Image (tube, grey):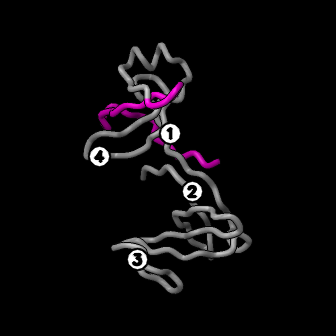
Amino acid sequence: MMRDGYAAQWRGREYEASPDGDDVRLYQTEPGEGFTEVRAGRFVRVVPAAEVDDLAYVRTRCTWQGQPFIVLARHENWLRVEYTGGRWPVAEAMGLEAFDFGVYQGWAPAAEVTDLREHRA
């Protein structure tokens, strides 16, 4: 699974989440007790942050062409990746797009990406 966002443990289950002050929004793809449909296939429940057992930011890290990246998205056989090596000459030599000052992104063939792993912060 490719994740880039918050995850929360609540009542023994992990949910996609979004902190909101003293509350945490929990998301799931199916109906459930206390969950409200916000759009087709997307349900939310707001719980007090004190009731959440764990809240962490989860990112998928990887290696592409020997360089460190995070995975932002997947589309068919491609991964949207962001370079985390901090060396602009390397990013430019790889043909990455300057997304913002010091932020370089690109599309990598999924078959060329190695060492996929989740990182929790």
Please give left or right for residue 38 compared with residue 22 in the image.
left
Quadrant in the picture for residue 98: top left
Please give left or right for residue 10 compared with residue 90 in the image.
right
Disc 4 element: strand
The residue indicated by pointer 2 is: 6
Residue 53 percent coordinates (x, y): 69, 68
Check whether the beta carbons of the residues at disc 2 and disc 3 lie within 8 A of each other. no
Residue 77 percent coordinates (x, y): 26, 42
User: Where are the magenta residues, as a range?
Assistant: 99-121
Disc 1 element: strand
Question: Up-down: is 35 above or below 94?
Answer: below
Name the kind of residue labelled 1 in the image. Answer: Arg
Question: Dot 2: within a 10 Å radius of its alpha carbon, few (fewer than 14), some, or many (20 or more) residues?
Answer: some
Question: Dot 3: within a 10 Å radius of its alpha carbon, few (fewer than 14), some, or many (20 or more) residues?
Answer: few
| Residue at image coords 56%, 71% | 13
Name the kind of residue labelled 3 in the image. Answer: Glu
The residue indicated by pointer 1 is: 61
Residue 105 percent coordinates (x, y): 42, 31
**Among numbered discs 3 and 4, the one appearing first in the sequence:** 3
| Residue at image coords 56%, 51% | 58
Closer to us: 34 or 9: 34
**Among numbered discs 3 and 1, the one appearing first in the sequence:** 3
The residue indicated by pointer 4 is: 75
Which of labels 4 and 1 is toward the front?
4
Most common SS among magenta residues: strand
> What label sits on residue 92 in the rendered view?
none
